[in-house]
Image: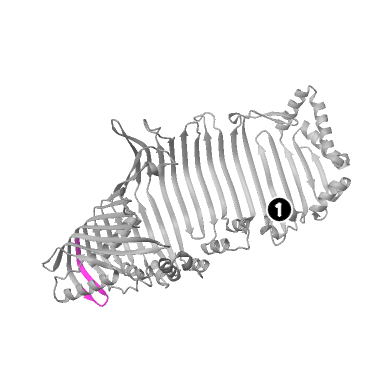
C-alpha cells in the first residue's frame, strides 16, 4: 500500500511538469517558461517532446519525457539516482493561473512510465524500478507555485524539502488510474513484478485526502537458491505468487509530516484515520532444471485475511537538525560529520507517533511435504492464527497485543500445538532519547544498561493451551489459563507481582517419567494437574515486602502454601539487584507460615519406601523422623525441633494438615535469625514466636 501511495505522489508531481513544451503561445507560453526554469532549478533535465497540438481548449503533448539525475556520496561511497518520467500522450485542458499556482480542469494520460535507477557504478544497476500507469485521469488539478531549492553543494539533502512540501500541496477533486504495473530489478536480475487493477483518490487539498481506493492486485517475487541458503537450503528457484483483494484508506492527512519537516505546529496530529486491506494469498513454487526440463512443485501456501489500521498519528518534532546532519554525511566523511553531534538531542527532536489499532485476521501457513527430486530440507508445516490485534502502539509503549486461535503442526516427530489466546498488556519501553543516552553512559556497566533498558510488561496471559502427540487421545500438556501481572515498576523491578496458574495438566508417562524417586521412597506419576498462585507486593517507601498466597497444588497429591513479610528492605535493591543477597540480610523477618495439606503423595512415597526397606509403615516413618531430626543438627535436640519432627510424623501418617507458623514479638533482623539458628537454636522458638500444629 505504501508503494502505491508513493506512485500516486510521483504521478501527481510528474503530471504538472508535463506542460513544459516550447510550442505554446501567450500566457501558456509564459507559464511554460516558468516551468522550464523550475525544472532546471530542481535538477530536471533532458526535457523532450515529440509533438504538440491544440485540441479545443486542451493541449496534447505526445512522446513527452523528462529526466532527473543526481548523486549522493556517503562515507566515500557514491550512489547515482536517475529518474525518467515519460508519456505516450498527455492531454491538458482548462488551464488557468493565479498567485497561488496553476490549475487544470482535467489531465489525461493514456500511458505513463516512471523508471528509477540507483547505481553505485560498480557494474549492473544496483536497483531499478519501473512503473507503468494506464488511463490516468485527474479532475480539477491544482499545482502550487514552484519552490526555490537551495544550493546542492551546501544542502544536498535538505534542499529537497521544499519540493516535498510542494507535492504535499498538490490538490484535485478526483484522480484515477489503472491498471498499474511495476517491475523491480537488482543487479540486472528481475526480482519481482506486480499489478493493481485500479486506483482512485477523491478530494485532496492542502495535504489532506478524503479517500483512496485500490483495486485487486497480483504479483510475483523471484527468489534464487542463494537467497535461501541457511534457511530452507532449497536447491531451486522460487516464485512467490501473490494476490490481494481491494484496499482503501480514509482521512489521509500529511500536514503532521509537513509540520515535522518545518518545525511548526500542525492543525491536526491525525496522519491516517483508517485503512483496510483486502485478503492476501501467497503461493510458493519451486523450479529446478532437470534432464527432462524444469521441475515445478508447489511447496508452500500462505494466506492473510483482511487487515485494518486506524488512528495513525504523528505529533511534534523538528527535522531541522536531522536534515542538517544528513547534509553533512553527504558532504563529509562519517567521522568528520559526526564530530560535535549530540545524538541524544537529535533523538529528542523526533516526532511522536501513535497507532490506535492494527488488526489482521485469519493467517495461515502450509508448507507441503518435501520436494521430489530436489535437494530440499523443508519440513511439512500446517499453521494458522485466527487473529492478531495490537492497540495503542506508541514510540514508548504498547497498550496490548493479542493472538487468538493459534494452531501449528509440523513433521516429523513434532506435536500439535493449539492455543486459545495469548496476550501482553501495558508494555512500556525506553524512548529513543533514553536508549541513546543510556548506551552512551560510560559510568554504567553493561548489566546496568540492560536493566535500565529492559521493557516493562504489565500483563501476560495464556488461555487454553494444548500440546499433543497422540492425535487427541492423550494430550501431553493442557492448560486452562495462566496470568501474570506486574505493576508499579521501579527501574526494571515490579513492586507488585502476581501469578495465577489454573489447571496445568502434564502427561508424565509420555515424558518418560512414570515414577519419581525421592530419598524417602518413590511415587507413581500419571497425568498430573497443577495449580499455582503468587502475590508479592513491595512498599518501597515503608521498606516492606509481603508475599501472600504463594501456593502450589498437585491435584489429589499435595497442597503447599507459604506466606511471609519482610521489613526494612533497602531501596538500594532497585538499583543494584545483583547484590540482593547481602542487602536482604539487613532486612527483618516480620512473620509468616508454611502450610501443607491434602498430601496422599507423601503417604504413597513413605509406603513405597517402607516396602523397599522391608519394614512396616510405622517403623519406616519413625526411621525417617530420626533421620530428619539428625539432619536438623542442634535444632533437632531442642523442644521446638522435636515438636516439628513429631508434627511431621503425625502428618505423614494422616496427611490432613501441617502448619509451621512464626509470629515474632517485634521485627527480627534476618542476620539475627540466621545467627540464632546456628549459635543458640534453643532460643529460636522464643525469638521467632514459632509454633507447629497438625490436624484438619
The residue pinned by badge 1 equals 546
Who's the residue at 29% across and 49% down the image? 194
Residue 373 location, quadrant:
top left
Vertical placement of residue 242 versus 435, above or below: above
Q: Residues within 10 Å of mark 1 (few under 14, many from 20)?
A: some
At 78% from the left and 52% from the top, the residue drawn is 589
The figure's colour scheme reads one colour
Is 468 placed above or below 593 here?
A: above
Which element is circle 1 on? strand
Quadrant of the snapshot with the N terminus: bottom left
In which quadrant will I find the C terminus? top right
In this rendering, does residue 80 appear at all? yes
The reply to whether the magenta stretch includes residue 97 is yes
Which percent across, then down, holds residue 147?
30, 73
Q: Is residue 375 left or right of residue 615?
A: left
479 left or right of 649 in image? left
Q: Which residues are magenta?
A: 96-108
Total numbered labels placed on residues in the image: 1
Q: Quadrant of residue 39?
A: bottom left
Horizontal arrangement in the rendering, residue 378 relative to residue 553 (left or right):
left
Asked if 677 appears above or below 657 in the picture, the reply is: below
Q: What residue is drawn where x is 34% and y is 64%?
A: 71
Tell which residue pokes out farthest to the bottom in this image: 99
| Percent of width and height locating residue 302 | 38, 42
Q: Nearer the viewer, residue 130 or 107?
A: 130
Residue 26 position within the rendered picture, expressed as x and y whole percent measured from the top left: 14, 76
x, y percentage for residue 443? 63, 63
Q: Please name the predominant secondary structure of the magenta segment in the image.
A: strand
**Is residue 267 visible to us here?**
no
Residue drawn where x is 59% and y is 34% of the image: 506
Amino acid at each position: 500500500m505504501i508503494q502505491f501511495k508513493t506512485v500516486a505522489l510521483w504521478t501527481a508531481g510528474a503530471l504538472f511538469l508535463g506542460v513544459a513544451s516550447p510550442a505554446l503561445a501567450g500566457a501558456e507560453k509564459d507559464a511554460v517558461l516558468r516551468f522550464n526554469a523550475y525544472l532546471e532549478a530542481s535538477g530536471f533535465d533532458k526535457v523532450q517532446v515529440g509533438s504538440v497540438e491544440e485540441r479545443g481548449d486542451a493541449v496534447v503533448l505526445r512522446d513527452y519525457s523528462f529526466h532527473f539525475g543526481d548523486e549522493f556520496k556517503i562515507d566515500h561511497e557514491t550512489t547515482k539516482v536517475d529518474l525518467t518520467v515519460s508519456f505516450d500522450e498527455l492531454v491538458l485542458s482548462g488551464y488557468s493561473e493565479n498567485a497561488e499556482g496553476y490549475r487544470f480542469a482535467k489531465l489525461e494520460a493514456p500511458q505513463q512510465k516512471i523508471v528509477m535507477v540507483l547505481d553505485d557504478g560498480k557494474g549492473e544497476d544496483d536497483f531499478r524500478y519501473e512503473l507503468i500507469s494506464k488511463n490516468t485521469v485527474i479532475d480539477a488539478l491544482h499545482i502550487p507555485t514552484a519552490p526555490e531549492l537551495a544550493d546542492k553543494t551546501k544542502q544536498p539533502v535538505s534542499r529537497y524539502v521544499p519540493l516535498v512540501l510542494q507535492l504535499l500541496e498538490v490538490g484535485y477533486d478526483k484522480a484515477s488510474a489503472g491498471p498499474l504495473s511495476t517491475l523491480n530489478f537488482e543487479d540486472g536480475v528481475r526480482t519481482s513484478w506486480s499489478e493493481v487493477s485500479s486506483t482512485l483518490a477523491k478530494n485532496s487539498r492542502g495535504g489532506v485526502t478524503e479517500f483512496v481506493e485500490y483495486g485487486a492486485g497480483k504479483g510475483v517475487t523471484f527468489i534464487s537458491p542463494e537467497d535461501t541458503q541457511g534457511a530452507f537450503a532449497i536447491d531451486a528457484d522460487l516464485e512467490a505468487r501473490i494476490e490481494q483483494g481491494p484496499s482503501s484508506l480514509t482521512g489521509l492527512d500529511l500536514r503532521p509530516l509537513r509540520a515535522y519537516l518545518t518545525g511548526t505546529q500542525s492543525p491536526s496530529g491525525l496522519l491516517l484515520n483508517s485503512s483496510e486491506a483486502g485478503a492476501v494469498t501467497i503461493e510458493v513454487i519451486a523450479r529446478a532444471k532437470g534432464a527432462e526440463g524444469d521441475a515445478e512443485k508447489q511447496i508452500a501456501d500462505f494466506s492473510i485475511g483482511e487487515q485494518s489500521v486506524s488512528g495513525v498519528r504523528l505529533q511534534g518534532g523538528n527535522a531541522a537538525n536531522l536534515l542538517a546532519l544528513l547534509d553533512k554525511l553527504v558532504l563529509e566523511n562519517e567521522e568528520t560529520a559526526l564530530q560535535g553531534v549530540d545524538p541524544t538531542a537529535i533523538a529528542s527532536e523526533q516526532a511522536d507517533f501513535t497507532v490506535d489499532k492494527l488488526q489482521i485476521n485469519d493467517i495461515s501457513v502450509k508448507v507441503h511435504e518435501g520436494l521430489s527430486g530436489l535437494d530440499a530440507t523443508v519440513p511439512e508445516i500446517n499453521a494458522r492464527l485466527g487473529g492478531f490485534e495490537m492497540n495503542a502502539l506508541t514510540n514508548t509503549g504498547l497498550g496490548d497485543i493479542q493472538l487468538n486461535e493459534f494452531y501449528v503442526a509440523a513433521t516429523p516427530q513434532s506435536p500439535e500445538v493449539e492455543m486459545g489466546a495469548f496476550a501482553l498488556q501495558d508494555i512500556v519501553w525506553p524512548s529513543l532519547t533514553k536508549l541513546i543516552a543510556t548506551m552512551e553512559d560510560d559510568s554504567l556497566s553493561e548489566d546496568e544498561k540492560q536493566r535500565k533498558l529492559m521493557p516493562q510488561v504489565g500483563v501476560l496471559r495464556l488461555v487454553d493451551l494444548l500440546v499433543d502427540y497422540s492425535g487427541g487421545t492423550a494430550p501431553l500438556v493442557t492448560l486452562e489459563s495462566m496470568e501474570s501481572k506486574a505493576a508499579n515498576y521501579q527501574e526494571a523491578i515490579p513492586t507488585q507481582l502476581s501469578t495465577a496458574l489454573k489447571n496445568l495438566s502434564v502427561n508424565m508417562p509420555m515424558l518418560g517419567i512414570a515414577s519419581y524417586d525421592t530419598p524417602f521412597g518413590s511415587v507413581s506419576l500419571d497425568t498430573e494437574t497443577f495449580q499455582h498462585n503468587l502475590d508479592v507486593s513491595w512498599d518501597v517507601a515503608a521498606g516492606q515486602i509481603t508475599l501472600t498466597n504463594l501456593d502450589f497444588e498437585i491435584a489429589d497429591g499435595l497442597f503447599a502454601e507459604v506466606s511471609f513479610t519482610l521489613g526494612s528492605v533497602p531501596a538500594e535493591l532497585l538499583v543494584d539487584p545483583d547484590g540482593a543477597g547481602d542487602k536482604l540480610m539487613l532486612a527483618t523477618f516480620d512473620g509468616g507460615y508454611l502450610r501443607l495439606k491434602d498430601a496422599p503423595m507423601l503417604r504413597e512415597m513413605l509406603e513405597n519406601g517402607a516396602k523397599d526397606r522391608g519394614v512396616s509403615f510405622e517403623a519406616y516413618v519413625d526411621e525417617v523422623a530420626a533421620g530428619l531430626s539428625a539432619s536438623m543438627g542442634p535444632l533437632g535436640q531442642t523442644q521446638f525441633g522435636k515438636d516439628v519432627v513429631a508434627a511431621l510424623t503425625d502428618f505423614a501418617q494422616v496427611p490432613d494438615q501441617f502448619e509451621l507458623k512464626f509470629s515474632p514479638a517485634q521485627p527480627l533482623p534476618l542476620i539475627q535469625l540466621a545467627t540464632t539458628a546456628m549459635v543458640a537454636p534453643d532460643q529460636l522458638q522464643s525469638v521467632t514466636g514459632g509454633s507447629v500444629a497438625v490436624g484438619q
